[in-house]
Image: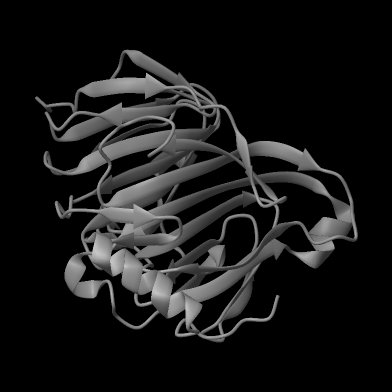
Amino acid sequence: MPTFKKIATILNPPAPHMVGDGFRVHNFFPSGYKIKMDPFYLLDYNAKIEFSPTNKLRGVGVHPHRGFETVTIAYQGAVAHHDSAGNSGVIYSGDVQWMTAASGILHKEYHEEEYSKKGGPFQMVQLWVNLPAKDKMTTPKYQALANKDIAKFNLPEGNGVIEVIAGEYNGVRGSASTFTPIEMYNLRLNTGAKIIISSPAHYNTALIVVEGSIKVNGTAQATTNQLVHFEHEGLEIKIEAEKNSIVLFLSGEPINEPIAQYGPFLMNKPEELQQAIEDYNTGKFGYLEE
């Protein structure tokens, strides 16, 4: 008999706020709810909204990061990225952008130009993934994962597909490289699909219902925009799609190191934050045109 992971809580999205003028997000953690999700430090959930057509590029201007990774998952809409390491690209529906800020980088992100002109639905998730102390000052890097290149596991009998962004599902290795063990999947489930996901007991685990409605562990229902947070007890999670659903599954081994955070910097000690501010102010993060 499987030992299901006990559900700790099912959370509704907190009140939204704007990040720049292009991202209307619900911060599930750390501000919205005090749940333990190490190595995931932040989850900004951009629930589906409609943007009107405009010739103005909405988004967030040049800003720094150090000590962690940003992961942006696009469900609808399109976002253009530029950074001071010379990386640039656009993520469209189904794509993932995995940016390792590490020792320090400047970047900016805006709605892609053609999407802005047409307007339409916009739906994204952005995560901050912490880096262990030994890796916080490594060289920045950028992983652009187009949907066609993301590893996939096709469920039997046409029940849907599991996009393995990171980690491994049923022998399929994820497309992203990570510094610590992380399982990150998009579950695209058709009505009636039933799957079981295994995850080590000590991992911090949650899922978000991006679209649709699911039954978890045979009893609990979670619907669009809700987050299900699990306790450490148990190894498996049973998910049944009550209608066509998209679910983002997150599970990771905790780093268990002290955190010092200030604005866009995520370090271990207060003095490291002071150093980050000084390095930014003296131009050591490079240059990026507004």
Residue 80 x/y as whole percent: 67, 68
Asked if one can make out residue 286 in the rendered structure from this viewpoint, the answer is yes
Give the residue displayed 72% in from the left and 50% down from the top.
Answer: 21
User: Which residue ends up furthest to the top in the rendered image?
Assistant: 219
* Number of dots carrying numbers: 0
User: Which residue ends up furthest to the left in the rendered image?
Assistant: 1
Left or right: residue 193 compared with residue 229: right
Can you say which quadrant of the picture contains the C terminus? bottom right
Asked whether 212 or 107 is in front, the reply is 107
Residue 118 x/y as whole percent: 88, 54
Left or right: residue 111 compared with residue 29: right
Left or right: residue 220 compared with residue 245: left
170 is higher (above) or lower (below) than 68: above
Asked if one can make out residue 79 in the rendered structure from this viewpoint, the answer is no
Which color mode does the image show?
A: one colour
Give the residue displayed 22% in from the left and 41% down from the top.
Answer: 204
Can you say which quadrant of the picture contains the N terminus? top left
213 is higher (above) or lower (below) than 52: above
Residue 143 x/y as whole percent: 45, 73
Asked whether 250 or 279 is in front, the reply is 279
Give the residue displayed 27% in from the left and 68% down from the top.
Answer: 272
Give the residue displayed 56% in from the left and 61% down from the top.
Answer: 95
Quadrant housing residue 28: top left
